[in-house]
Image (cartoon, helix red, strand yellow):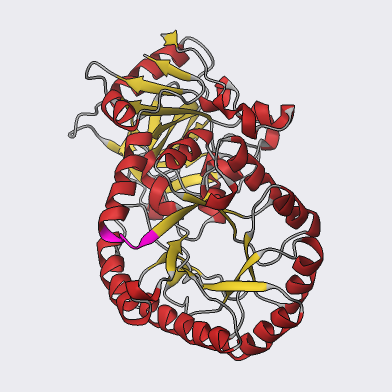
Amino acid sequence: MEKMEKNTDHASVTPNKAVMEVLSPENCDAVILDNGRTINNFIDNKIKELDSLDNEPFYVANLDSVFERHHRWLTNLPRVKPFYAVKCNNTPAVIQMLRTLDTGFDCASKGEIQMALSLGVTPDKIIYAHTTKPGFHIKYACAHGVDLMTFDNEAELLKISQCHAKAKLILRIIVDDSKSLIRLSSKFGARLDTVEKLLERAKELGLEVIGVSFHVGSGCTDSLVFKQAISDARHVFDLANLLGFQMTLLDIGGGFSGREDFQVKIEEFSEVINGALDKFFPPESGVQIIAEPGRYYVESAFTLVVNIIAKRVDMDHPDGEENSSNKMVYYINDGVYGSLNCLINDPAHTSVTPYLHKAVDSSKQRYWSVIWGPTCDSLDKIIENYWIPELEVGDWLLIDNMGAYSVSITTTFNGFEKAHIYPVVTAETWHALNLSHTNGIINE
């Protein structure tokens, strides 16, 4: 493999050594798949390589999937500019891809803002979308030109007035999130009956409120909640306009799944959202519409590849059936304290379906199996009551749909290392985007 010469275009936005480290080749490598090579070819080759080394777990990040998702978004929601939720997956190659696609970025802390800036994102493409921010994080945003930020309470207004008086504020309101797998309204958002008082307080403090935001919850299962939420936002716009604010931005949040097997797809959401926007915020209103998708872009783009490090055969039987087969117990080198933390931390992703890397004869006998993670904690269980052919120590398993809220909240509990991430992109997509200026690119 030949490493391309690095470009130093990012130097103007990397103020210190710590930021430069974010752009290290180890973090930003992407593999270009040319000459007809596929992701499966890459996985095969990487497994062969690791079989002779340390058998560590790894991700393959399909940047073509991110690219395709973006064009699907533009097709279905042409009026809504996506601001990718960095919290969902902060892999530098993903940020760089989306920056090239001209998305904005939803950041929730100083660290996320710093990372986005270090990867070439300009301050005007960032919304500081957290309603309860540490004061020094607000000062950092101010010092680096990030003006757009959310609030939902009076104490936050006072803090912003002291730390970033010129900020452009977005009032986050509570909307119906009862149809989502993860509800957020118990923690964030202002009730509609408190909105007028908050707007009046902002005016007293001389702060500029320019818009409204909401979030219907993560993993939304009913597209119709967006219609009522957009209607509620229109009500707040009207109140703010009466108080003299120049309201120019609506943020419709997230809630969009990235899985093809999810019950509601982007096409159904877009039909409801586009209709509600045309009714309450028609194009002639001049209001800019943005959203904060996270899962949508990355959930199905990442595949986790893990190795079976141990095996045990138990003689007990499921459901007391003495004539049934033995129970197979396997241990893999990643678990709920690592990449599979979603199983305990993400109500929208509570199960996985590992499958063997190598082909298996469909007629091969299947055994009642349990798969554990590598740590010493009995909470670290991946799947049970799983009927699969017998596996061996050293076999590799693949787990799809691992891009959302996995890499960004992985720990190193018990000293197990985090899974390495290998971003890959086809030569066709790479050249179409003219991404050759990005740091640390590798040709395979």
Vertical position of residue 181 compared to residue 432: above or below? below
Tell me what residue is drawn at x 75 percent, y 61 percent.
164
- Location of residue 158 by image quarter: bottom right
Residue 167 picture location, percent across and down: 67, 63
Tell me what residue is drawn at x 34 percent, y 74 percent.
284
Q: Can residue 199 be seen in this snapshot?
A: yes
Quadrant that contains the C terminus: top left
Query: Is 97 on the left or on the right of 417, as rendered?
Result: left
Tell me what residue is drawn at x 64 percent, y 58 percent.
147
Tell me what residue is drawn at x 41 percent, y 18 percent.
46
Residue 418 picture location, percent across and down: 59, 32
Outermost residue toward the left? 363
Query: Is 154 on the left or on the right of 401, as rendered?
Result: right
Residue 441 picture location, percent across and down: 45, 20
Vertical position of residue 322 compared to residue 362: above or below? below
Q: Nearer the viewer, residue 304 or 120?
A: 120
Q: Which of 71 and 205 is in front in this view?
A: 205
- Location of residue 199 by image quarter: bottom right
Would you say the magenta stretch is mainly helix, strand or loop? loop
Vertical position of residue 77 compared to residue 63: above or below? below
* 150 drawn magenta: no
Q: Nearer the viewer, residue 236 or 261?
A: 236
Quadrant that contains the N terminus: top left
Vertical position of residue 200 compared to residue 136: above or below? below
Q: What stretch is highlighted in magenta?
A: 76-80
Q: Can residue 410 be seen in this snapshot?
A: no
Residue 171 picture location, percent across and down: 60, 74
